[in-house]
Image (spheres, helix red, strand yellow):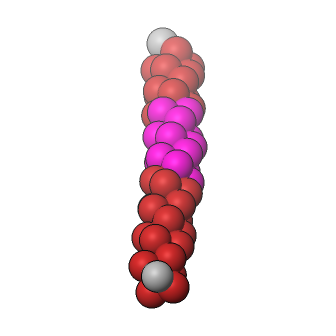
Amino acid sequence: MPQLDFTIWLLNLTINWLFFLLIFLSFTNLYTTLNNINNLNNKKTTTNNTQWNWN
């Protein structure tokens, strides 16, 4: 049964890598989303500042 053991080990490794990639990509996606929200807030405040300066 060494062939079966190797197949199970390879499958386990692949599943571990898939889980790692899933978690890593979700965290990076969360970081970019928060960064985009922060940029939108900064743009909003700058436009508010310019409007306030014009008034």
Q: Is residue 8 left or right of residue 20?
A: left
The residue that appears at 48% across and 47% down in the rendered structure is 26
Q: Quadrant of residue 49?
A: top right
Q: Main secondary structure of the magenta part?
A: helix
Residue 2 locus on image (x, y percent): 51, 85
Residue 30 belongs to magenta span? yes
The residue that appears at 46% across and 71% down in the rendered structure is 8
Q: Is residue 37 above or below residue 27?
A: above
Q: Report the span colored magenta.
A: 23-38
Instruction: Name the residue nearer the viewer: 49 or 27.
Output: 27
Instruction: Name the residue nearer the viewer: 9 or 1.
Output: 1
Camera sees residue 27:
yes
Residue 7 locus on image (x, y percent): 43, 79
Q: Quadrant of residue 11?
A: bottom left
Q: Is residue 12 above or below residue 52?
A: below
Q: Quadrant of residue 27?
A: top right
Residue farthest bottom in this picture: 3
Camera sees residue 25:
no
Residue 22 locus on image (x, y percent): 46, 53
The residue that appears at 51% across and 28% down in the rendered structure is 41
